[in-house]
Amino acid sequence: MQIIDNKALLVSTKYPDKITSNITKSKVVQRYDESAEVLVSWGFEEAKRLSELNIKNVPSPIERDYDWPGQYTPMDHQKTTASFLSITKRGFCFNEQGTGKTASAIWAADYLIIKAYKKDSCSVPSIYHVFCVGS
């Protein structure tokens, strides 16, 4: 998966119609013998939908849009964890003890709450179940 100009994702897949039929802001840009490349707008709803379609390693727009507030600057693995948690409907976080799972979950939740308020809503966009498992 490749991020194009911080605006779109280029997804290589064997099933391009699965993506284009489920995401309106997507189109097939190149077809090969057994696969295709699909360009998908890099927005929250599109990233969440790609994740729901079981596309692996989908980057969340949290990486581009969020300012990571707080006393500490997040480490790369914390950003990756928050990215995963922000677009995964049900996810388990099995990061090791002491790696900042709680901070990652808080940043992901904060991002989702901010997204909800920007939509003039008072709730998180959808019900998310997040489990952080520590040793």
Image (cartoon, rainbow, N blue to C red):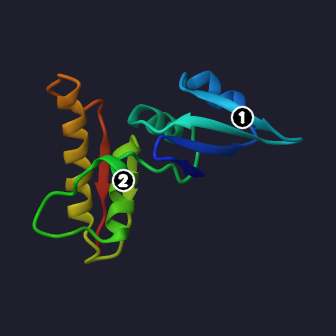
- Relative image position of residue 64 (x, y in whole percent): 36, 50
Estimate the spatial distance between the alpha carbons at disc 1 and disc 2, rounded to whole Å: 25 Å
Residue at image coords 63%, 22%? 21
Depth order, front residue of 34/134: 34
Residue at image coords 38%, 66%? 94
Residue at image coords 77%, 37%? 30
In the rendered structure, which amino acid carries the disc numbered 1?
Answer: Val
- Relative image position of residue 9 (x, y in whole percent): 55, 43
Label 1 or label 2, whichever lies nearer to me, is 1
Locate residue 34 relative to residue 123 in the image: left or right: right
Q: Earlier in the sequence, mark 1 or mark 2?
A: 1
Decide: few, some or many residues near mark 2? Use Cα within 10 Å; few <14, some 14-19, many ≥20. Answer: some
Residue 29: quadrant of the picture: top right
Locate residue 125 relative to residue 110 in the image: left or right: right
User: How many marks are shown on the rendered structure?
Assistant: 2
- Where is mark 1, residue-wise? 29
Depth order, front residue of 113/38: 38
Q: Secondary structure at mark 2?
A: helix
Q: Secondary structure at mark 1?
A: strand
- Where is mark 2, residue-wise? 63
Residue at image coords 46%, 46%? 6
- Relative image position of residue 25 (x, y in whole percent): 53, 26
Work out which residue is located at the far right of the displayed protein and give it.
33
In the rendered structure, which amino acid carries the disc numbered 2?
Answer: Glu
Residue 40: quadrant of the picture: top right
Decide: few, some or many residues near mark 1? Use Cα within 10 Å; few <14, some 14-19, many ≥20. Answer: few
Q: Are marks 1 and 2 in contact (CB under 8 Å)?
A: no
Locate residue 37 relative to residue 135 in the image: left or right: right
Question: The C terminus is located in which quarter?
Answer: bottom left
